[in-house]
Each structure stands twice: as C-alpha cells, then as structure tokens.
Image (tube, grey):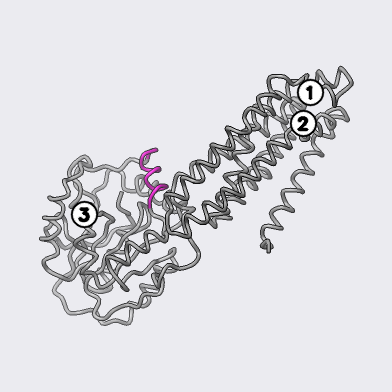
Amino acid sequence: MVPARDHAQQSLLQVALIGVFAVVAQLGAASAAIISVLLTLTAVPSQCGTALGVAAATLVGQALGRGDAREARAWGWRTTAVTVALTAPMGLALALAPETLLGPFLRDPATLATAILPARIVGFGVAVNSAAVVMGFAYRGAGATKIAAAVPFVSLWLVQLPLMAWIGLTLHAGLVGIVGVQTGVVTADVLVLALLWAGAAWTRVEIEAGSASLAALPAPLRRIAVLGGAGAGKSTLARRLGEALDLPVIHLDLIAYGPGWTRRAGEALQADLARSLEGGARVADGTYGEASALTLPLADLVLWLDQPVWLRLFRAWRKTRVHRGRARPDRPDGCEEQFGWGYARMVLSFGAWSPGLAAQLEAEAPGRVRRLRGDAAVSHLLRELAPRNAPASNSRSEVRGGDKRTRSPTKEAASP
C-alpha cells in the first residue's frame, strides 16, 4: 500500500506540472505543442530511469536491512551510473539531431525552427533528469523519504516555477528560457542529492536496533562515554553530566591533538588516556577508535548523540564563529577551528545512527548503549538524572591531556 504522504507528494507534483504547462501556454500554441513533443520523445529515457530507480530502491533497502550502509551507498552510485550511461545516448541523439526527431511531429517549418534550441537543451539534460529519478528512488529504498520528497518539492515550487515565469515570460526568454531553467534546477537537485548521498544522514533507520534508545540507567553511574558526530553537542552534554553527577570530564580532543591540530599517534593517545582513566569515575567526551577500546568496555553507560545533519552543520559553523580567537576547555591549545569544505564534509559523512553502528557499540558495551535522538532525548536524560543524589566530592574537574584542572562550564562546543 502506498503511504498517504506519497499520494500527497505525487498530487502536489502533478499540480506543479500543470503550473508549468500554464506558463508555457502563455507563450502560445506552438510552444505548447513543442513541449508536448519533447515530453513524448523523452518518455523512453524517463521510463528507463523509473525502472532502474525501482531496482535501486530494492538493492539499497536490502543492503541496509543487512546493516551494510557502505554497500547500500555503493548500489545507489552504481544504479545512477548505469542509468546515466543508458539514457545519455538517447539524450544526445535529441541534442545532436533535433530536426530528424522533431520533423515527423512538427510539420510547420516555423514551429520546427523554434523547437531546435529547446530540444538541444532538453537532450543534454535527459541523463541528468534520469539520474534525479534514480537517486530519489534510492533514498526511498533507504527509508529517507523526507529527503526524496523535500529536494524536488522545494526546487519545483520555490525555485523552478517562479524562475520559469520570470525568465520565460517577464524577461521574454520564451521556451528556451523555460527549458533552460528546468535543466538547470534539476542539475542542482542532482548535486544536492549526490552530496547528501555521500554523507550518512540517509542511513538512519526508524526501527530501533536492539534496545539502544531504551537502555536503563545503571546505579551507580560513575563511568560514562559520550559519542557522536562533529557538531552533535558532545562537549556540552559531557559538561552537564559532569555537573549533574559531580564527575570529572575528559575531553578526548585534548589528548588526541597537539598544537595546530596535529594528530597524535594512537599509542601516545592511549597511554595518556590510560593515565587519565586511573581515577575510575569520569565522563569521557569524544569519538575515537583508539580511545573506545579503553573507555567503552568499562563504561557504565555509552551515549550516542544522534542529531540531524543540518543541525550539526549549523552548530559546527556557529562554534567556529562564536569561539574564534577564544580558548576553550575542550579544545587543545594552539588549535583554531575553521569551518570549510573539509569540516563540512566530515560532518556530513559521519555521525548518523545506523544498524552497523548499533551492532558495533553493542558488541563493545553490551546492554549499556543509549541512543539520544535530538535535543528532546538529551533533556529527558538530564531529567532522569536530576533526582539522583550526587556523591560527595571536593570538586569537579575537567581533564586536559591527563592533568585535572577545575574549570567552570562554558557554552556548547562539539569536538571537531
């Protein structure tokens, strides 16, 4: 059964298509006839895209069902590449020989002459349109229907239709302007979908893996590991947990990096971390494989901060702006954060919850993993901790590279 939201999406897309024809109709009967012929000539590559899109959805869904996000991503790329390879020659035929293909349909010489340039533009965009269709199906196969629906919906209603009316009618660019806008917007859609596909946000699954979101809080709670992607708010949560439970906080960034974001060797990191863990009770903040071998097996509770990728991107950018030129207790000395493409790519590529991640964490900390989905789950956790009596302690401290120093809390900063 097709979900009601899919019916609604298709209905809105059909209404938008009517809007496109309404814009074209204002150019006259000849332009409307040309568009109808171009739709007919591109029907075959469009159907190929749909067929391969269904295959992509099936293959991606099966791979994610096995918990293999890497294979699912590969199937998305493969089916898109096959679709482009199959439909590009069809589009090139229209782009390079429009008179031959349009001639049997458009008998009027003036109308045929008007159709040549729009046909070339449409022809060059055939493969791009097919790629957009396949990628939309791939997202649906992954269960990321919001991405599959939101990107074309926003671009069609908020960008494509207004630009078509403005460029085609107001600026008198005519049919050339209209099909140029359509090709350009769909190309932008494909780039956005490809960028998101290269990341990890779409690997989220709605069915909980194990009992990760329901793990009970142990008593006593003295050793906590806070994990997640960049911009998720790990450092802020670690500090708040330290305050609530009167525990020292270990920011792993301070141990993992030297001045200028120089990455320390894994052996040195583990040696310093082992010394920091000698006290037993602590909140460890940071997602490092070398550190997890020491922190997760002994943790009473492992928390994974699962925040939407757009929120992590915003917080990562905000962090670099707010704390520029300022020292932070969770950042190594001599390390200034810069938000650029490399940082953004790191945020996009790592941090989303997936079946594979759930299995890995459960293997290292059986029954002690809790997934915190969004700020509401973080607030709920802190409310759960509120009634607990904090153990007596002289002072709470944050650990810098193995040395304990008493510090006051600062505002949100996630590890880079």
Where disc 2 sits, the SS reads helix
Label 1, on which residue? 115
Question: Vertical placement of 389 versus 12: above or below?
Answer: below
Where disc 1 sits, the SS reads helix
Q: Quadrant of residue 386?
A: bottom left
Q: Earlier in the sequence, mark 3 or mark 2?
A: 2
Label 3, on which residue? 290
325 on left or right of 73? left
Residue type at the position of mark 2: Leu
Residue at x 74% of width, y 37% of height: 43
Magenta region: 340-350
Residue type at the position of mark 3: Glu
Task: Rate crowding at label 1 as few (under 14), some (14 to 19) or many (20 or more) other CA atoms within 10 Å.
Answer: many
Where disc 3 sits, the SS reads helix
Q: Earlier in the sequence, mark 1 or mark 2?
A: 2
Question: Vertical placement of 222 versus 78: above or below?
Answer: below
Q: CA distance from mark 3 to mark 1?
A: 62 Å
Most frequent secondary structure within the magenta stretch: helix
Q: Nearer the viewer, residue 88 or 224?
A: 88
Q: CA distance from mark 3 to mark 2?
A: 58 Å
14 in magenta: no
Q: Quadrant of residue 260?
A: top left
Label 2, on which residue? 38
